[in-house]
Amino acid sequence: MTNVAVIYYSSTGNVHKLALAAAESAEKAGAEVRLRQVAELAPEAAIASNPAWSAHREATKDIAVASLDDLEWADIILFGTPTRYGLPAAQLKQFIDTTGGIWAKGKLVNKVVSSFTSTSQTHGGQESTILALNNTFYHWGAIIVPPGYADGIQFDIKNGNPYGASHVGYNNEAPGTENLAAIEFQARRAVEIGTALKRGLEATA
Ligand SMILES: Cc1cc2nc3c(=O)[nH]c(=O)nc-3n(C[C@H](O)[C@H](O)[C@H](O)COP(=O)(O)O)c2cc1C
């Protein structure tokens, strides 16, 4: 069995919806899946000032919070984050910054990783967000598996982001069917490649 951890941050629900679709797709592809949100860091006053943020937080309070064990357990890690000024959200970065201990023990080597994001603008920094996460993965010795143009769905102009599924919600519209198809493909591809890599590594161990 291939283990997949979907680890994400979402304040108003867009990345959460992509993460759910990624988890379902990975399960359908035969993986065992853990869906995990990272811990919230924002001050209560900031959350309370945004009704969509408060409502989403309440609606997802039962989703388990990501731990280092989830990273060690996973063969494949799918990371989701909204874009924040062209970068990943601090909440996800904070979680990543707790990995020093397991990184030093080599526990993140050969993990298959793939990332997805959500913005409010078409040119709002999707690629810079995903590339910023990738910087971390080089340090881990992880294997980045992007969607590329490895499936016809990627040629659809509304999907088509080879770096990773990228939703755009100008007025906070939730991800639609094309975004969901893109993340489903990305998760499926990560499971395929991750499973093949795992088998290959086990065969040569
Ligand atoms: C502090 C902050 C910074 C943001 N920076 C960007 C940005 O650089 N580009 C962009 O297009 N959208 C930006 N956004 C919008 C969010 O990325 C967008 O609303 C996203 O869909 C939120 O995802 P979520 O619903 O999962 O929280 C920003 C939002 C906030 C609150």
Image (cartoon, rainbow, N blue to C red):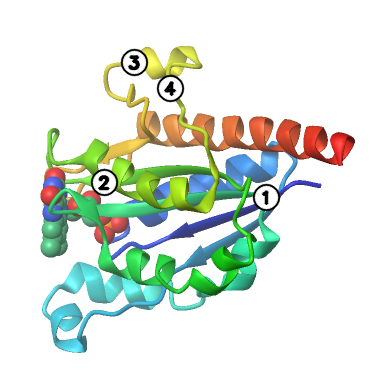
Q: Earlier in the sequence, mark 1 or mark 4?
A: 1
As measured in the structure, the alpha-carbon distance from the residue carrying label 3 to the one carrying label 1 is 29 Å
The residue sitting at the front extreme is 104
Q: Amino acid at mark 4?
A: Gly
As measured in the structure, the alpha-carbon distance from the residue carrying label 1 to the one carrying label 4 is 20 Å
Q: Which residue is mark 2?
A: 129
Q: Which residue is mark 1?
A: 75
Instruction: Provide residue 61's location: percent of width, then percent of height.
Output: 44, 78
Q: Earlier in the sequence, mark 2 or mark 3?
A: 2
- Classed neighbour count for the residue bearing mark 3: other residues with Cα under 10 Å, few (<14), some (14–19), many (≥20): few
Label 2, ligand 1: CB separation under 8 Å: yes
Q: Amino acid at mark 2?
A: Thr
Q: Amino acid at mark 3?
A: Asp
Q: Earlier in the sequence, mark 2 or mark 1?
A: 1
Instruction: In the rendered view, tell whether residue 42 sits above or below residue 151.
Output: below
Q: Where does ligand 1 appear, by image quarter? A: bottom left
Q: Earlier in the sequence, mark 4 or mark 2?
A: 2
Q: Which residue is mark 4?
A: 148
Q: Earlier in the sequence, mark 4 or mark 3?
A: 4
